[in-house]
Image: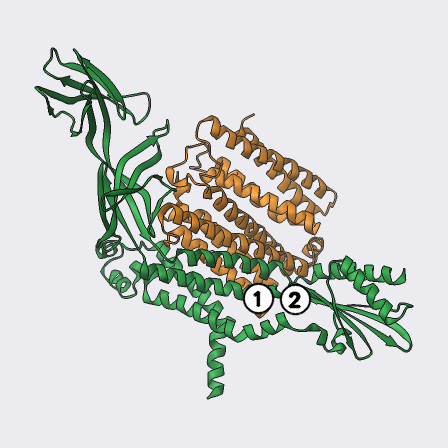
C-alpha cells in the first residue's frame, strides 16, 4: 500500500511529468492561434466543412483555452508543481537551515576546492588570523571547537536554494488570481451618449445586463487626430454619480482608465451619430438652452416673444484633418436671417440688433467603455513579482559555503580551507582562490 | 545626417563585421578578430546615435515617441540588442569566434529592415493604444530576451558544427573554436539570461494590457506564442537542471527555441491576427 502511494506521489512529483505537460501545453496552444477562437458555429462549418466542425465542437476547439482538457492540463501542471514542492522542500529547507558547524570533518578533505597551510603560530592565533582574512574578503564566519581543533564556517545565499520553489509557488499564485478573477469578476461594456448617464453593463459573451449601484455620466467625448488623419486620442470626461449626486469627476483616455469601487472603466471605442450638440445663449438675458440638432433640419427655440429658428445647412473640410467647419442659418425674427461658419467644437458670437447670442456646436458621440471587475488581479501581480524574484535567486545567486578547520597535527598547526557552491562553480573557483590567497599571505606575514 | 543614413551605415557595418568575424574563424587569423571588434564597436555607436536621432526626429515631427513602434523600428532595435548582448559576451568570455555565429543575426535583421518587402521605414504617429510608458519597458524586456535567444541559437549551431565534424579538414577548422564544454556552458547561461528577460517581457505585456484594456491575458496569438516559447525554454531548463541534459540536446533545443521566438516575432504578425499587428503596417 505505502509502496503504491509512494509511486503515485513520485509520478506526480516527477520532472518527466513536468516535461510532458509543458510539451503538451506548448503544442496544443498552437491550435488556438491557428484556428480562430470564439466564432459562431457556422463560421467553422464554412471554413472547415461539416465533419471537421463537428469534431471541433466535440473537442471544444472553438474555445480551446477554456476547454475541459486544456484546463485539465493546467491543473496537472499545478498538481505537479505542488506535489514536487511538498516532496522536495523539506530536504531543501534542511539544507538552508543546516548547522554547518556540525559537518562531518572527513568531508572537508574531499571537497573539490581545498587548500592546506601550515602556519608557525598556535591554532588559536591561526584561527583569529584566518577569521580576519575571511572578514576582509566579505565572509562572516562563525566558529566552534571540534575534536582536535577549531572549525570556522561562513556562507552566502543559502536561501537561494528556495528560488526555484518560489517560482513554482508564483505560478500557483497566478492561477489562484486568475480563478478569483473568473469566479468573482466580470468583463463587459457600456455605451454612453454624451450628456447622459448609464448604470448598466452588458457582459461580454453572454450579453447579460449587470446593474451597477452607481452610474456614470459622460459629459463630453473628444476625438483628436494627427495631421495624417490617424486618431491621436480618444478622451471622455466622466462623472461618477451616487444616487444622482456627483462623487468623482475624471477624464479617461486609452491607457488611462477610471477606477471606482473595484470597477475599472477603460476607453475602448466611440460611436458617431451624425447629430450635433448645440448650446444657444442669449447674452442679454443669460437664458441658455442645449439642443441635439440634425443637419438639414430646422430647430426652433421659443424664447420670450420671439421664435428663434436655426439649422445646419452646409459643411466644409478645414486644413486640420478630421475637423469640419459648419454653416449655420440663424433667424430670431428681427430682420434678415444671419448665416455664419462655426468649427466643430467652437463657439461663435451672433449679434442680432440689440440682442447678442452665443452659439456653440460640437459633434455628438457616444463613448464606448469597457468595464472590468477583477479582484484577482493583485494576486496575479504578486505572483509575477514572486516569479521574477524567484528566477533571479534560482539563476544568479548561488549557495556558497566555506569551512576552515584549524587543527594540531603532530605538534604543528594545520589550516584546511575547503568550500562548495551549488552552482556556477567556475566563478566560485575564482572567489575561492582570492580567499585562499589572502589567508595564505596573512598567515605567512 | 539623418537617422536613416546612420542606420543604413550600420547595416553595412554589421555586414562588414560579420564578414571579418567569419573570415577570422575560417582562415584562423586571430588578429583580424580585433578588427571585427573594432568595427562592431564603431557600428554600434553609429547605430545607437541613429536610434537616438530617430527618436529626436519623431519629436521634430510632433509625434514624439520611442522608436519601437513598427516592424522597421523593432528590427533595428532587435539588431541593436543582439549587438550589445554580443559585445558583453565577448568581453566576459574573451572569445571573438562567437562573433561569427552571433553578429550575422544582427546584420540579417538590419538588412531585412532596410530591404524587406513591405517594411515601412517612415516615422508614424502612435495609435492611442500604444501611447503608454509601458511601451518602452515591454519592448526592451522582450527584445533583450529575443537577442539572448538569437545568440544562444548561434552558439547551438557552433556546438553542433564542432561536435559533428569528423573528417580531418574540418577538425582543424573546428579546433580554433572553444571547447565543447565551454560552448555548452555559455549556451546554457545565455538561455537562462534570455528566459529571465522573456519572463519579464511577458509580465510587462500583461501589466500593460491590463492597464489599457482590463485584461492581463486574452490568449491573443502573440501572447500565446510567447507562452509557447516560454514553455519550450522552461522545459529545456528543467531537462538540464534535473535530468542533466547537455551538449547536443541543449544545442538543438537552443535552435528549436529560437524558431519559436522567430515565430512569435514574425510569424504571428504576418500569418495570424491580433493586437500586435505592427508588422503588417
Toward the viewer: B100 or A34?
A34
Quadrant assignment for the N terminus of chain B: top right
Chain ID for label 1? Answer: A
Q: What is the drawing colour of chain B?
A: orange
Numbered circle sitting on residue A422: 2
The image shows residue A27 at horizontal and vertical percentages of: 42, 61
The image shows residue B36 at horizontal and vertical percentages of: 68, 41
Toward the viewer: A351 or A44?
A351
Report if residue A223 is visible in the image: yes
Give the vertical position of B84 relative to A441 (above or below).
above
| B30 left or right, relative to A203 | right
> Which chain is green in the rendering?
A
Toward the viewer: B261 or A222?
A222
Q: Looking at the rendering, which quadrant does residue B280 occupy?
A: top left
Considering only order in the chain, which callout, 1 or 2, is on the residue closer to the N terminus?
1
Give the vertical position of A30 relative to B60 (above or below).
below
Quadrant assignment for the C terminus of chain B: top left
Q: Looking at the rendering, which quadrant does residue A363 occupy?
A: top left
Q: Looking at the rendering, which quadrant does residue A238 occupy?
A: top left
The image shows residue A219 at horizontal and vertical percentages of: 26, 36
Numbered circle sitting on residue A162: 1
Amino acid at each position: 500500500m505505502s509502496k503504491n502511494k509512494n509511486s503515485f506521489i513520485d509520478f506526480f512529483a516527477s520532472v518527466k511529468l513536468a516535461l510532458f505537460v509543458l510539451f503538451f501545453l506548448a503544442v496544443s496552444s498552437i491550435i488556438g492561434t491557428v484556428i480562430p477562437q470564439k466564432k459562431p458555429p457556422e463560421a467553422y462549418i464554412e471554413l472547415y466543412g461539416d465533419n471537421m466542425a463537428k469534431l471541433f465542437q466535440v473537442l471544444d476547439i472553438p474555445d480551446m483555452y477554456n476547454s475541459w482538457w486544456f484546463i485539465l492540463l493546467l491543473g496537472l501542471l499545478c498538481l505537479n508543481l505542488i506535489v514536487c514542492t511538498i516532496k522536495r522542500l523539506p530536504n531543501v529547507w534542511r539544507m538552508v537551515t543546516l548547522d554547518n558547524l556540525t559537518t562531518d570533518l572527513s568531508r572537508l578533505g574531499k571537497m573539490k576546492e581545498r587548500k592546506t597551510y601550515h602556519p608557525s603560530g598556535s591554532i588559536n592565533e591561526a584561527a583569529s588570523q584566518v577569521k580576519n582574512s575571511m572578514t576582509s574578503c566579505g565572509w562572516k564566519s562563525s566558529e566552534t571547537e571540534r575534536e582536535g581543533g577549531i572549525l570556522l564556517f561562513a556562507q552566502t545565499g543559502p536561501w537561494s536554494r528556495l528560488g526555484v520553489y518560489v517560482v513554482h509557488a508564483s505560478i500557483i499564485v497566478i492561477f489562484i488570481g486568475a480563478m478569483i478573477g473568473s469566479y468573482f469578476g466580470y468583463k463587459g461594456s457600456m455605451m454612453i451618449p454624451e450628456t447622459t448617464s448609464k448604470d448598466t453593463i452588458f457582459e461580454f459573451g453572454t450579453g447579460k445586463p449587470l446593474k451597477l449601484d452607481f452610474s456614470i455620466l459622460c459629459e463630453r467625448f473628444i476625438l483628436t487626430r494627427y495631421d495624417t488623419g490617424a486618431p491621436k486620442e480618444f478622451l471622455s470626461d466622466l462623472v461618477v454619480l451616487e444616487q444622482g449626486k456627483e462623487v468623482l469627476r475624471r477624464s479617461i483616455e486609452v491607457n488611462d482608465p477610471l477606477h471606482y469601487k473595484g470597477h475599472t472603466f477603460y476607453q475602448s471605442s466611440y460611436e458617431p451619430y451624425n447629430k450635433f450638440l448645440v448650446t444657444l445663449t442669449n447674452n442679454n438675458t443669460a437664458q441658455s438652452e442645449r439642443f441635439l440638432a440634425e443637419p438639414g433640419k430646422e430647430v426652433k427655440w421659443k424664447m420670450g416673444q420671439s421664435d428663434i429658428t436655426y439649422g445646419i445647412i452646409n459643411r466644409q473640410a478645414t486644413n486640420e484633418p478630421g475637423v469640419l467647419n459648419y454653416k449655420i442659418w440663424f433667424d430670431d425674427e428681427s430682420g434678415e436671417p444671419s448665416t455664419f461658419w462655426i468649427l466643430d467644437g467652437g463657439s461663435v458670437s451672433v449679434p442680432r440688433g440689440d440682442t447678442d447670442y452665443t452659439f456653440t456646436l460640437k459633434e455628438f458621440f457616444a463613448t464606448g467603455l469597457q468595464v472590468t471587475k477583477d479582484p484577482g488581479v493583485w494576486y496575479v501581480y504578486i505572483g509575477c513579482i514572486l516569479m521574477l524574484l524567484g528566477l533571479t535567486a534560482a539563476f544568479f545567486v548561488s549557495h556558497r559555503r566555506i569551512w576552515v578547520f584549524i587543527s594540531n597535527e603532530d605538534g604543528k598547526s594545520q589550516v584546511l580551507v575547503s568550500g562548495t557552491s551549488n552552482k556556477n562553480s567556475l566563478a566560485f573557483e575564482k572567489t575561492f582562490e582570492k580567499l585562499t590567497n589572502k589567508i595564505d599571505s596573512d598567515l605567512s606575514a | 545626417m539623418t537617422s536613416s543614413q546612420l542606420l543604413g551605415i550600420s547595416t553595412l557595418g554589421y555586414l562588414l563585421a560579420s564578414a571579418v568575424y567569419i573570415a577570422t574563424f575560417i582562415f584562423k587569423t586571430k588578429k583580424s578578430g580585433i578588427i571585427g571588434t573594432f568595427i562592431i564597436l564603431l557600428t554600434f555607436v553609429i547605430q545607437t546615435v541613429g536610434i537616438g536621432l530617430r527618436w529626436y526626429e519623431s519629436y521634430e515631427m510632433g509625434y514624439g515617441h520611442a522608436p519601437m513602434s513598427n516592424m522597421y523600428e523593432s528590427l533595428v532595435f532587435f539588431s541593436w540588442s543582439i549587438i550589445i548582448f554580443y559585445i558583453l559576451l565577448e568581453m566576459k568570455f574573451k572569445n571573438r569566434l562567437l562573433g561569427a555565429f552571433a553578429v550575422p543575426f544582427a546584420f540579417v535583421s538590419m538588412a531585412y529592415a532596410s530591404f524587406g518587402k513591405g517594411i515601412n521605414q517612415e516615422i508614424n504617429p502612435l495609435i492611442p493604444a500604444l501611447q503608454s510608458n509601458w511601451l518602452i519597458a515591454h519592448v526592451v524586456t522582450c527584445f533583450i530576451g529575443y537577442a539572448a535567444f538569437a545568440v544562444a541559437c548561434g552558439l547551438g549551431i557552433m556546438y553542433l558544427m564542432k561536435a559533428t565534424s569528423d573528417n580531418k579538414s574540418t577538425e582543424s577548422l573546428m579546433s580554433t573554436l572553444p571547447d565543447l564544454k565551454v560552448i555548452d556552458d555559455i549556451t546554457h547561461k545565455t538561455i537562462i539570461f534570455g528566459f529571465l528577460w522573456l519572463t519579464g517581457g511577458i509580465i510587462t505585456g500583461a501589466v500593460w494590457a491590463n492597464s489599457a484594456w482590463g485584461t492581463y491575458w486574452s490568449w491573443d496569438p502573440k501572447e500565446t506564442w510567447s507562452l509557447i516559447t516560454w514553455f519550450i525554454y522552461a522545459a529545456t531548463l528543467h531537462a538540464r537542471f534535473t535530468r542533466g541534459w547537455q551538449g547536443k540536446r541543449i544545442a538543438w533545443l537552443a535552435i528549436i527555441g529560437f524558431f519559436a521566438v522567430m515565430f512569435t516575432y514574425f510569424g504571428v504578425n504576418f500569418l495570424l491576427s491580433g493586437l500586435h499587428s505592427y508588422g503588417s503596417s
